[in-house]
Image (tube, grey):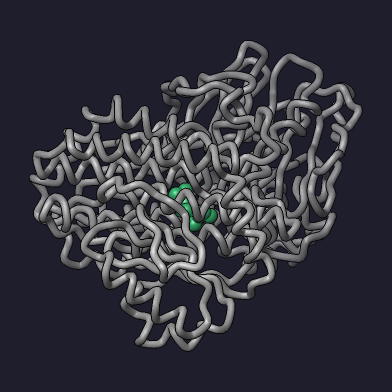
Amino acid sequence: MCGIFGYIGTKQDASTSILEGLKSLEYRGYDSWGIALQKSDGTVHITKHPGKIGDAKAPDIQSSIGIGHTRWATHGAISRENAHPHTDCTGDVVLVHNGIVENFDKLKTELEAKGHTFKSETDSEVIAHLIEEFLTSSQDLGNVMKQTKQAIDGMNAVIVLFPKHQTFYIIKNGSPIVIGKASDGYYIASGASAILPHTKEVYFLEDGESAKLTTDALTIFDKQGQEKQPTFISLPYDAQMATKGDYEYFMLKEIEEQPTVLQTISKSGYEDIQKAATLIKNAHETYLIGCGTASYAALAGTYLFSKIAKRHINHSIGSEFSYLVDFLTDKSLIIPLSQSGETIDTISAVDSAKQKNAQILAITNSIGSTLYRKADTNILLNAGPEKAVASTKAYTAKIAYLYLLAHEMNGSYDKGIDHLDTAIKAISTLIDNQNDIEQIVHGMKDSTSIFVLGRGLSYPAALESALKIKEVSYVHAEGFAAGELKHGVLALVAKGTPIILFNPHDETYEDTISAAYEVRARGGYVIGLSDTNHEAYDEFIHIPDCGDCTVIPNVVVAQLMGYYLALAKGFDPDKPRNLAKSVVVK
Ligand code: M6R
């Protein structure tokens, strides 16, 4: 969703840094963009555009103070007028905003009655005029920003440039804001990876906090408005890891990084896993929660814990969890799973659980993120920056952690490691032979529907696989429990419908073969993934038996299928239409 990038410091090419910063936030999803730069004569140059940044050049302006924004439209159409930055009537207040001002309608009516003229349809512009209004009775910017913070409802992050004072003020209550401290000034962004080319030293602003920045000073104010000493942390990766390198798309780069990510977990995940196992053992009940891909990892966790650890662990979609919290106590353990650590539905679920004093063990890929800060205990996936909208390596990392955790609880950690290592080799082989998958995909590119079937552990893997295929290729894809076929799904199978069938050699094998026959009898085209070929398959992809870890290479096949299907249909797999990487509004 919307992205913010700002700079205030000593170098004169803020323009270039801001444009580059916005480009590195493109992965969040946006439909228009803009930049405001303060010139040396004190005036502000604003440029705004509907559409993508593409080959746009940075404004040719010397400046050491500026803010930029990528907008994901909520209030008002995708247009130049609605793009950020927004200004008040005088131009003395210039701002960018992430979030939704829930009471904007009422505020706008009041401000219009007082003579303010609006240039856009956005809720964001209301904040600029509100600040202008408060400035008529006080020139104390800190006080004005405090009043503004109190007056706007909702989860918002706002950076305001006061050109006359060469000062930024930031207020935050929701959307993420990271402040980086570099030798040439301060960088502000809504995602840490955008700051990495400039510095690793970052401070994540907490909800309710605010900040004042000048060329050479940063002051943080706590929720009560008192000055506080910020504790900067050092990001555990470098700028190179957040770039495409030799790859055309992040999605393929991230798919191919999976063997390395999983090897790191296999070699050095034990301490975290032990810590988490103890928490689960001591809890009265445990819930795994997440959204989208993370929700399918949570569902997989329920199967893994039941099968391997002989323990029932609930799972819930993040956005549904707040309706399930009534029985939680201080003995409950909630495990939010999240790549970004910023998904608002997962954060709200955690907030509901915290109100019941439940313990929070966050499994995220983002050090310093909101979920990371809200949790009592953290496990970092250490998958490195994931920038393609479609989550790949963060998903398999989550499954690997849950798998090893279930084994640790069962006292069979070494067996878990053996299976994980076999799965890593299987993924490497799939990556080496990805042309085979590309070929199979060519035969599917005109299909209007694709189904993915599996039983047991392969059922959540089927759901995740279908999501991967649909979100980047826009082909209707659905995952089903193979046993559900005859309860309705068969009605959807027509001649040539591709059916991806996960058939590991476990307790589900024979029944899944029956499913293959059932769909073939209705004309379905069966692509079987298993360790041995079978006459019921039209197409066969060899996946060695990796025990319960076989689901990991199975999903990697679907990731590659989604990727190649997107390319075959001429779509950019990194930036699927209508989707954003970080979903920070409800
Ligand atoms: O950052 P999170 O893991 O919390 O994100 C959750 C979902 O928004 C995310 O997994 C989404 O479903 C992806 N587009 C899936 O590829």
x then y, percent, for residue 258: 46, 37
x then y, percent, for residue 98: 61, 49
Residue lying farthest top? 183
Check the image and report above or below for 504 versus 37.
Answer: below
Q: Nearer the viewer, residue 489 or 540?
A: 540
Task: Tally the marks.
Answer: 0
Q: Nearer the viewer, residue 134 or 216?
A: 216
Check the image and report above or below for 279 versus 298.
Answer: above
Check the image and report above or below for 13 versus 495.
Answer: above
x then y, percent, for residue 119: 83, 58
Residue at the (34%, 58%) spot, across then down? 349
Q: Is residue 86 visible?
A: no
x then y, percent, for residue 152: 56, 55
Q: Quadrant of residue 577?
A: bottom right
Q: Is residue 522 left or right of residue 454?
A: right
Residue at the (48%, 31%) spot, across then down? 384
Q: Is residue 537 left or right of residue 574?
A: left
Residue at the (80%, 37%) spot, across then down? 36
Q: Is residue 72 visible?
A: yes
Q: Nearer the viewer, residue 584 or 295?
A: 295
Check the image and report above or below for 384 versus 562.
Answer: above
Q: Quadrant of residue 460?
A: bottom left
Residue at the (38%, 37%) spot, across then down? 424
